[in-house]
Amino acid sequence: MANDWLVINSNKESSVTSLSCSVCNIYAEKIIVINFSHAWAFTGSTSTQLSSAIDHGRGEPYKVAMRFHLKKVGKMP
């Protein structure tokens, strides 16, 4: 499911520079939880390891953003 939200940011040479989250970007103003990293929502996390993306997807801020998203698209009551 990461292909739905994971944004891979790169430079002119096509080298990966950061990872960000399209869902957290859309709902950033509504995410009011401890440990919300604005980097994932806006500038991108410079930790480009797979484990970083997995940790983000398991984190509470991402889960909150996904609940907003699923409600908006009608896939959650």
Image: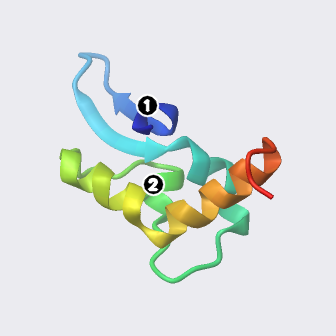
Res 65 → quadrant: bottom right
Point out the image quarter for the N terminus. Answer: top left
Q: Position of residue 11 (x, y in %)?
A: 31, 25
Give the structural element (helix, strand or loop) at label 2: helix
Q: Nearer the viewer, residue 46 or 3?
A: 3
Q: Tell me the kind of residue under disc 2.
A: Trp
Q: Position of residue 62 (x, y in %)?
A: 51, 60
Q: Is residue 12 left or right of residue 69?
A: left
Point out the image quarter for the C terminus. Answer: bottom right
Q: How many marks?
A: 2
Q: Position of residue 5 (x, y in %)?
A: 50, 39
Question: Which residue is drawn at the image coordinates 54% and 63% (left, top)?
Answer: 63
Asked if residue 35 is positioned above or below residue 46 in the image, the reply reads below
Q: Earlier in the sequence, mark 1 or mark 2?
A: 1
Q: Residues within 10 Å of mark 2 (few under 14, many from 20)?
A: many
Question: Which residue is drawn at the image coordinates 65% and 69% (left, top)?
Answer: 31
Q: Residues within 10 Å of mark 1 (few under 14, many from 20)?
A: few
Give the structural element (helix, strand or loop) at label 1: helix
State how far apart marks 1 and 2 are (Cα): 15 Å
Residue carrying label 1: 3
Q: Is residue 66 left or right of residue 19?
A: right
Question: Which residue is drawn at the image coordinates 24% and 16% (left, top)?
Answer: 13
> Residue at the bottom extreme?
34
Q: Position of residue 33 (x, y in %)?
A: 57, 80
Question: Which residue is drawn at the image coordinates 61% and 55% (left, top)?
Answer: 66
Q: Nearer the viewer, residue 32 or 14?
A: 32
Q: Nearer the viewer, residue 19 or 54?
A: 54
Q: Is residue 60 left or right of residue 69?
A: left
Q: Tell me the kind of residue under disc 1.
A: Asn
Residue carrying label 2: 40
Q: Nearer the viewer, residue 1 or 20?
A: 1
Q: Is residue 67 left or right of residue 18?
A: right
